[in-house]
Image (cartoon, helix red, strand yellow):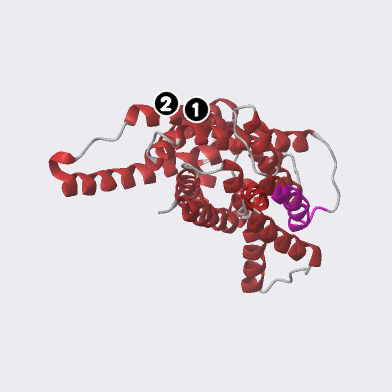
Amino acid sequence: MAKSIRQIVLPLVAAIIWGTAFVVQGDVADKISPFTFNGSRMIIAALVLFGIILVKEGVKKKKLGSEYKKPDVKKALIGGVFCGVVLTVAVNLQQWGITLKVRPAVSAFITTLYMIFVPIFGLFFGKKTSASVWIALLIAVPALYFVCGVKDFSFDAGTLLMIMCAVMFAVHILVVDRFTQDCDGFNLSCAQFFVGGVISLVCALIFEKISFTALFENGWQILYVGAISSAAGYTLQIEAQKGTNPTCVCILLCLESVFALIAESIIYAIRGQSFVYEPLRYLGCALMLVAVVVAQIDVDEIIEKVKNDKKGK
């Protein structure tokens, strides 16, 4: 798949998956403790990806025969440790924030602020960001504020956890950017979920009382979040970041909030429940789409072309 198409399509699909899974995660959050929930979903994701890897490599080996080369598992494991540790911290900070009753709107808005931290942190690693992306960010921040329906904002312990969560998600995107260039996306994703699942479950055994009844009663939800939201969503993110601008990718990933709003509207309609129409939230959706389009325009290249045309005249 061409780089330009991969940079748009894959994170867009990931955003749709994460957005539609938002309702499911919200239902489970009140019934299962953070470490138990995240440990369970990550182990399921690792198992799903491990099965896919076995099938994928088996088909490749059969097709190539003697020309088949085993993937570099060592690099994937090293990358998986770094990515897994960072992702574990990020998702558990998010769950802790939710348990401290941070409102979903505020939680969603703060979490998506990782798109601001990515280009800022990237500057320290020599990652230059074009003018068009900075313009897109200026549009996207108020857009997400509207989409998430934030009416009031208070700073407390839960808010601080969410800010830390956004920082860690930004670090995760940059760590993935570092290792995805040398690793197979499926192997790296599988390794990160195995590491994250083990760390979370160990913490659950130490700090939480695991309710197997709650796990059984919410088995389908956990399976969905593990296999679809985690295994598929984060693997798409990793594949999308290969050789592309991480800031552009994360702006597309932030469309998760837009798709969450759409999914919420549809689910309310199916359940026959009333849904309050808030014009500003839909204005935010429109602005987010504008931000995505702007991010794909290379302003620097256009300016350079104009300068060259003037010199030619």
> Which amino acid type corresponds to the residue marked 2 in the rendered image?
Ile
**Looking at the image, is 46 positioned above or below residue 227?**
above
Q: Residue furthest front?
A: 313
Q: Are marks 1 and 2 in contact (CB under 8 Å)?
A: yes
Give the image location of residue 244, x and y in percent: 51, 44
Give the image location of residue 213, x and y in percent: 51, 45
* Residue position marked by numbered label 2 in the rendering: 78
Q: Is residue 32 magenta?
A: no
Q: Regarding mark 1 in the picture, which secondary structure is present there?
A: helix
What's the magenta region?
135-150
* Residue position marked by numbered label 1 in the rendering: 82
In the shown orientation, is residue 193 left or right of residue 154?
left
Q: Main secondary structure of the magenta part?
A: helix
Q: Regarding mark 2 in the picture, which secondary structure is present there?
A: helix
Front in this rendered view, residue 250 or 274? 250
Please give the name of the residue rendered at 62% of the width and 64% of the height, measured from the top-left corner. Answer: 263
The image quadrant that residue 210 belongs to is top right
